[in-house]
Image (cartoon, helix red, strand yellow):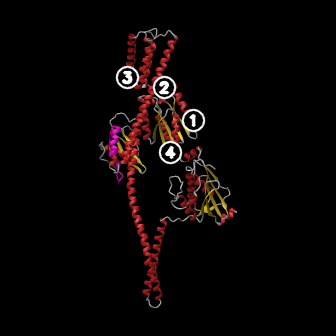
Amino acid sequence: MTDSATQPDLEVLARAAGPRLLVGVGAGPGSEQVLRSARILAERLNSPWIALYVETSRAIGRAEKSRADRNLALAREWGAEVITTTDEDVARALLRVAGQRSVTQIVVGKPSGGSLWKRLQRELIIRRLLRKSGGIDIHILGVDSSATGTRGSRWPVRVPLDVRQYLAATGVVLLATLVNLLLEIVEPRRGEYSTALILLLAVVVLATFLEVGPTLVAATLSALVWDYFFLPPRFAFRVNQFEDAMLLGLYFVVAIAVGQLTARIRAQQVAERQREDRATALYLLTRELTEATELDQIPQKVVERMQHVFEAQIAVLLVDQSGHLKQHPAGTFKMAGTEHRVAAWVLEQQHPAGKFTEHEPTAEALYVPLKASAGTVGVLGLRFKQLVPPSIGQRNLLDAFSQQVALALERHRLQAVSEKSKLLAESERLSQNLLNSMSHEIRTPIAAITSAAGNLVEFQESDFSETQKAMVMEIQEATARLNRLVGNVLDITRLESGHVKPKLELCDVRDLVQTAVRETRKELSGHHLTVEVPPDLPLVRLDFVLTLQTLTNLLSNAAFHTPKGTEVRLSARVEGPALVLIVADRGPGIAPQSLARIFEKFHRGPNAPTGGTGLGLSLVKGFVEAQGGEVQAANAPAGGAVFTLRLPLDKAGAMAAN
């Protein structure tokens, strides 16, 4: 029997864990409406939600980029986890992230406005989501683009209105035209096709430095210039020959395609460079925080790194022992009274606030919480020099920085707690040793006192007064009480020393075997596991935890010592008054000189792979014998090792088996 998890099982587990929403955020004017709907849905379901922005190589205008930044900032303020990813296929990116984060529902918008090309693109994305979503629910929200007051573009690519780039494109095309005219004076017999190559080269050069809009203008202008100045009849927008008309059309298509591709590649390079810069900055901060050994070094490293990366003044506020924020002196931004109020709100609500946010937008700085596992440990304040809101990349980097800072502060706190725990553990160990030693030492005088008190009792009939008899009784009672106290201390010492006391109870062998297989699934992933358990096995009285650990040790040992692809067999049956569990493999077996010592502590075979401690089989022997059973190891005739466990059945189990 081979045990493996299927995709439907994972979906069932994800749904059992509760709903989890993913909303696609774009640069369109209707994304804010989609975000609001997703927020309401998440609140009704009481579930976490993720806002995902997919970056593609398609160049977008400044207005779209600013709108996307604003949408993601709103998602952060509304409690969403913001994720950005890069992919040319938006549907594929949504489904990939949904699978990674165990998302059960995806929310996307379907704006009604825009050009025909954009509507077709959105229809394709939604169709692919519906076709490949599997068990994930898809919510498609109708969005009215006209409600936002923004009309859709008539072209698939938005053209940014940067006059300088358009002037540069026009100037370069005119310069290339002038070069062609001068070359014609030098070489009159030069054909018109060589002039097209020079103009095409100018378009490619422009696409390397300019955005898509100016590149398209340059391609169109170069085609018109070639037709007017160099194709016959010259100085007229007219083509007489079919070949020239076809070449002109091909030139126009090639110029636009080359310009688009070059601009797209350049945009990808810029995006990759930005991601590399962010990754490097995050790596340097993480390394510096890891090297910090004292609490005061963490804010210093944070301020030095962040003011360089974000070009901003930094304030670090940490939570003191009383639960209030206290600004660290390493910060470069000196906060006023109103700024402290905003930072206190961030600490309480655990949401960003301040400049570029909806809450307290008139503040001088942007404040973000430092959230750790034990709660918010502080607040970061950034007073930006820039007047525009932080970009998507800056906000993602800021989130990553705040997480790393919170982890560093949490690690320092846990380290302090660990040091304190070590001191307490050492103190407890010394006190335990003292108690253990004193307990044994006290037993000797207690025995002497008990014996002396017993001897005194023999004389109390004739020689002792009533007062003396009462004193002897008090001595005996005090001695017995002290003896019980010392016995309790010794019992605690034996318990903490690791003596095993099995807890025997009726267990289902099939449940035991299935649990062992499930817990060793990873180790046995490269082997063929066969499980043989009769359906009529009786309930057996045993310690479930000890027996489970015994089987998992044997299965892991078989996977560790046998080649990939070989068979491992686990079987269970009743033989007389015993339950027999057998774990067999088809590996190299046990060396003859190791059979006698196979269950000794720290013993490892001569050909054993590197790794392991040699304690697994000794634990198996100890756990089985603690339950009154026995374990044997042998080599199978056909090859491989066989481990046989025999656990005694009680009378009820033996009668049920018969």
Give the mark nearer the N terminus: 1 vs 3.
1
- Give the residue furthest to the front: 593
Q: Which residue is mark 1?
A: 130
Q: Quadrant of residue 280?
A: top left
Q: What is the three-letter code of the residue carrying label 4? A: Ser
> Which element is circle 1 on?
helix
Give x and y (percent) for residue 282. Answer: 39, 41
Membership of 301 in magenta stretch: yes
Give the mark nearer the N terminus: 3 vs 4.
4
Side of 385 where 612 appears, left or right: right
Q: How many marks?
A: 4
Q: Which residue is mark 4?
A: 47
Membership of 5 in magenta stretch: no
Magenta region: 300-324
Mark 3, other Cα within 10 Å: few <14 / some 14–19 / many ≥20: few
Query: For this rendering, which residue is in front, 544 or 24?
Result: 544
Q: What is the three-letter code of the residue carrying label 2? A: Pro
Q: Which residue is mark 2?
A: 156
Q: How many angstroms separate mark 4 from mark 1 (CA)? A: 22 Å
Q: Which residue is mark 3?
A: 163
Q: Quadrant of the C terminus?
A: bottom right
Q: How many angstroms separate mark 2 from mark 4 (CA)? A: 36 Å
